[in-house]
Amino acid sequence: MKASNYFQMSTAELQVQYNSLKEKLFNLRFQHKAGQLESGKELTKCKKDIARVLTVLRQRELGISAEPVKATKKAKKA
C-alpha cells in the first residue's frame, strides 16, 4: 500500500492495520522457514508496510502530521 493511503487513515485504523501486518509477517516468516514461500518479496513488502504505518503513527505522535478530518455532509439549499 502506498504511504499516501496511510496518511488518510485514522489512528485507530492504523493500529488495526499494524496488528494485522505483524500477524501476516509472522505467518510469512513461518512459511519462509518451512520452505513454502517461493519468493521473499512478499516478506520484504510486508516489512516495508509495517515501517510505513509506524512512521505515520510516529509523525502524528510528534505533531508533524495531523489525523485526517472526516468530511461532513453539507445541507442542500432548496
Image (tube, rainbow, N blue to C red):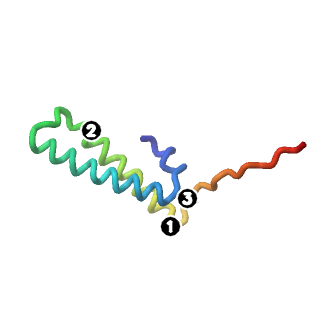
Q: Secondary structure at mark 2?
A: helix
Q: Residues within 10 Å of mark 3 (few under 14, many from 20)?
A: few
Q: Secondary structure at mark 3?
A: loop
Q: Residue furthest left?
A: 34
Q: Residue furthest right?
A: 78
Q: Dot 1 corresponds to which residue?
A: 62
Determine whether, in the image, residue 24 is placed left or right of residue 17. Answer: left
Amino acid type, mark 2: Glu
Q: Residue at x 63, y 53 (%)?
A: 70
Say which of 22 and 73 sits in front. 73
The image quadrant of residue 77 is top right
Determine whether, in the image, residue 23 is placed left or right of residue 62. Answer: left
Q: CA–CA distance between discs 1 and 3?
A: 8 Å
The image quadrant of residue 35 is top left
Q: Secondary structure at mark 1?
A: helix
Amino acid type, mark 1: Leu
Q: Residue furthest top?
A: 38
Please identify the quadrant where the N terminus is shown.
Answer: top left
Nearer to us: label 2 or label 3: 2
Q: Dot 3 corresponds to which residue?
A: 65
Query: Percent position (x, y) of residue 51?
Result: 36, 52
Q: Residues within 10 Å of mark 1 (few under 14, many from 20)?
A: few
Give the numbered dot on residue 42. 2
